[in-house]
Image (tube, rainbow, N blue to C red):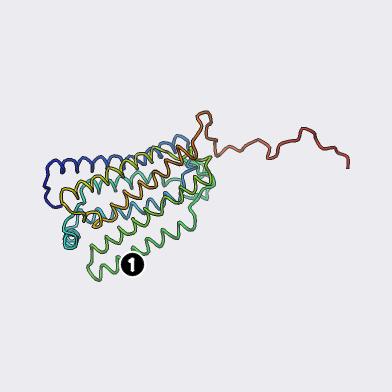
Amino acid sequence: MASWNSVQLEVLYNVLGWVAFVAWSISFYPQVILNFRRKSVVGLNFDFVLMNLTKHSSYLVYNASLFFSSTVQRQYREKFGLNEIAIYDVSRAVSWIISMSFKEEPFFVFKNDVMKKSRLLQRGHQKVSKACIGIVSVAWLSAAVCVFVAIHRHSWFWLVSCFNTIQVVMTVIKYIPQVGHLKLSPEKHGWFSIGNILLDFFGGVTNYGQMVVQSVDQNSWVNFYGNIGKTMISLVSIFFDILFMVQHYVLYRPKKTDEPSDPNVVSKEPLLETSDHPHSDSV
């Protein structure tokens, strides 16, 4: 990173960076806690979780490579002139992967009855869609192709940029299944933690503020287009978080007196209401 012109802005930059790290690192845990309290993941779209895992894995590859590899750093500086990746960017990605592992348990499909009974979380009839599997497969296949090309050309920054592109694409599309899931099944909205969204929104705002502070100090906006992944994380997260908050607080506002129904309990109410005047047996 280039030298700072203002000590105050440098301090503010680091403070915002660590605040974003904390907010984003713990943003997944409200959902994890809610899942284990309910012993169910009904209402949490599995496509969202799987694409989120792919996104964060790609983001970890990009940040770790740009932070630890001197070769990648040199190629980055030759193109953009500075490297704004800090240790909390790498730590944030690692924390995301760890927290995501707690959400992976219900993905496993057990065919053995004993294994089914031993699962901690119930998932109802939810499963990962074929479309999501196809998207994730294409993403990792593209990453594999980029690896072979980079090895031949020794274009290591280009390679990590490919992973950055993957995480940008996943960032754009990962929220769509969850938004649609809550729209089609608004009664399940109570099973999706709003704490996750609020922390993610706060992390996006502080991350974006951090980039603005650096741009003001350096009198250059290169970090916005030089690290398009970090820029997209903030903008897309803020957009969809606002959409989720509108769904939660406005469109599908949960009633205080109503408790979410247990997805594993079969209703005993008749499908059709009985008539006040029963039909005569006569023809």
Image quadrant where one finds the C terminus: top right
Residue 65 in the image, given as x and y percentages of width and height: 23, 56
In the image, residue 162 sits, relative to residue 204, either above or below, namely below
Q: Which amino acid lies under the numbered mark 1 shown in the image of this protein?
A: Val
116 or 38: nearer the viewer = 38
Judge from the rendering whether residue 203 lies leftward or rightward of residue 68; answer left or right: right
Judge from the rendering whether residue 275 lies leftward or rightward of residue 249; answer left or right: right
Residue 133 in the image, given as x and y percentages of width and height: 45, 58
Pointer 1: what residue?
145
In the image, residue 50 sits, relative to residue 158, either above or below, namely above
- Residue positioned 29% across, 69% down in the render: 149
- Residue positioned 31% across, 48% down in the render: 234
Whether residue 120 is visible here, answered yes or no, is: no
279 or 65: nearer the viewer = 279
Residue that extends furthest to the right in the rendered view of this protein: 283
- Residue positioned 86% across, 38% down in the render: 281
Please identify the quarter of the rendering in which residue 135 is found. Answer: bottom left
In the image, residue 260 sits, relative to residue 143, either above or below, namely above
Residue that extends furthest to the top in the rendered view of this protein: 257
> SS for tag 1?
helix
